[in-house]
Image (cartoon, helix red, strand yellow):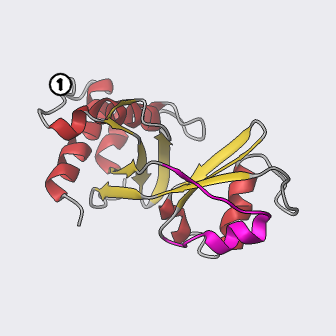
């Protein structure tokens, strides 16, 4: 069962960091909670009017959790290359989601059919690697791509790999997330 108080803390930390960068509030202060001092990997997803507005994260636990939330919140709001940086007037319309990633578990498979058979739709986040190509989808992406073959093809496309044929030397790791999401905001 997710700790909703901790989730509220993470969401407030992300929102405060973005508001501060926009000149709309004080600098974020990491609360005195030992969980925020542990190494952690997070993804921050921003949605506006029910549509993706930014999503950036960490796959490795290289920073303390509180710092990772701040870093990725700012990156999702201002550095996601798919979107213009968030404007001050958008802040009230953006809903924030914080996903805390588990340690990735490498999967052992020979061929994509064996990989597909190991995927757990709706549960697994997936990272794929082939040479210098890599990409990840959070478990939440299963909501748009519920069929494993479709999910893998879209992830291969995201990684710049051919989607219509099996990739040689493909490696994969799965992870889970604990996610906390703000309620949807008023349409802008």
Q: Residue at x 18, y 45 (%)?
A: 9
State the image coordinates of residue 124 (x, y, percent, origin top left).
Answer: 51, 64
Q: The N terminus appears in which quarter of the rendering? A: bottom left
| Quarter occupied by residue 114 | bottom right
Which residue is under mark 1? Answer: 26
Q: Nearer the viewer, residue 179 or 117?
A: 117
* Element class at badge 1: loop
Q: Residue at x 24, y 44 (%)?
A: 10
Q: Nearer the viewer, residue 128 or 144?
A: 128
Q: Look at the picture and state if 105 lies above or below 165.
A: above
Q: Residue at x 42, y 53 (%)?
A: 47
Residue 86 visible (yes or no): no
Span colored in magenta? 104-122
Would you call the spot at circle 1 few (<14 residues within 10 Å), some (14-19), or many (20 or more)? Answer: few
Q: Nearer the viewer, residue 174 or 87?
A: 174
Residue 24 visible (yes or no): yes
State the image coordinates of residue 85 (x, y, percent, origin top left).
Answer: 48, 33
Give left or right: position of 27 versus 62: left
Q: Is residue 116 magenta?
A: yes
State the image coordinates of residue 81 (x, y, percent, origin top left).
Answer: 59, 35
| Quarter occupied by residue 91 | top left
Q: Furthest-right residue in view? A: 165
Q: Residue at x 27, y 39 (%)?
A: 15
Q: Look at the picture and state if 187 lies above or below 16.
A: below
């Amino acid at each position: 069962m997710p700790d909703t108080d901790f989730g509220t803390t993470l969401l407030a930390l992300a929102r405060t960091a973005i508001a501060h960068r926009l000149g709309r509030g004080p600098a974020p202060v990491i609360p005195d909670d030992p969980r925020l001092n542990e190494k952690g990997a997070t993804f921050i997803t921003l949605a506006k009017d029910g549509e993706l507005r930014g999503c950036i994260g960490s796959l490795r636990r290289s920073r303390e959790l509180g710092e990772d939330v701040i870093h990725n919140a700012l990156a999702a709001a201002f550095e996601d290359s798919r979107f213009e940086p968030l404007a001050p007037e958008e802040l009230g319309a953006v809903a924030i989601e914080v996903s805390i990633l588990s340690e990735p578990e490498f999967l052992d498979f020979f061929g994509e059919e064996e990989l597909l058979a190991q995927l757990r739709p709706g549960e697994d986040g997936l990272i794929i690697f082939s040479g210098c190509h890599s990409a990840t989808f959070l478990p939440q992406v299963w909501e748009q791509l519920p069929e494993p073959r479709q999910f893998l093809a879209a992830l291969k496309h995201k990684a710049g790999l051919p989607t219509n044929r099996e990739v040689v030397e493909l490696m994969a790791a799965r992870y889970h997330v604990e996610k906390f999401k703000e309620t949807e905001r008023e349409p802008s």
